[in-house]
Amino acid sequence: MDAHWFKARSRAKGLTIIDLGDVIGRDRSAVSRFYTGRQVMTFDQARKIADALEEPLPEVLARAGIANAREAQQLTPGFSDSDAALWVPAVGVDRSCDDQIADALGRKPGVDVWEVRGRSLSLIGYLPGDRILVDTGAADRALSGDAVIAQVYDWAQGSAKTLLRQLQTPVLVSHSPDAGDWKAHVVDQDRVIIKGVVRASWRR
């Protein structure tokens, strides 16, 4: 359970521990037990909290320790075709090198290692398998020209897609050889929301 992440996301949305308890139909002590690891969040509770925090369900599942990021992506329809995802090494893979690089590049709470999955920014150097350092605390300060992680929500279907794009205010654009990535997305803070700014990248 990444309690720090949940608390930071809650503060960003102006939600208290009591509010989160109300979201899941429990009192604040249940949320406290999640944070301290004395109780495991259910899938349904994670879904409700993801909606309240306006965060992708796979990320909430992974942060809650319900599933690792790879499993969470598979459990959640609509997220499997994302351009990037939280990086979780495969079982048996040594993560110390990537951890050392991330720390040297300025990793701190709210700055996480992600893995590029698609070719949406391949023409400007972000290739599948690359690691990127994503600053979620800078989402509201993204500047034109920044590479960003964004969520595109389909409220009718109850799904979302994670995009890796370049912000060219007020739209997100790709630099991809694949025509399927060429659609521009207007950042409207409802259907299209910037979730973080890419601060660094590296290739193994």
Image (cartoon, rainbow, N blue to C red):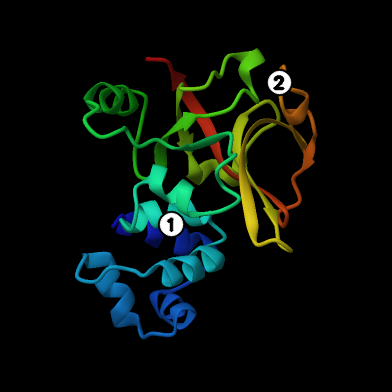
Q: Position of residue 117 (x, y in %)?
A: 53, 29
Per the image, the residue denoted by label 2 is: 175
Badge 2 amino acid: His
User: Amino acid under label 1?
Assistant: Val
Labels 1 and 2 touching (C-beta < 8 A): no
Residue 83 position by quadrant: top right
Q: Is residue 90 visible?
A: yes
Q: Which residue is mark 1?
A: 60
Residue 155, image quadrant:
bottom right
* Label number found at residue 157: none
Image point (41%, 39%), residue name: 111
Quadrant position of the C terminus in the picture: top left
Nearest the eye: 158 or 35: 158
On screen, residue 166 above or below 56: above
SS label for mark 2: loop
| Residue 9 coordinates in the image, percent (x, y) | 46, 58
**In percent of the image, x 76 and y 51: which residue is there?**
188
Classify the position of the N terminus by image quarter.
bottom left
- Picture quarter containing residue 24? bottom left
The Cα atoms of the two marked residues, 1 and 2, are separated by: 29 Å
Local crowd size for mark 2, using a 10 Å CA cut-off: few (<14), some (14–19), many (≥20): some
Residue 53 point in image, percent of width and height: 52, 63
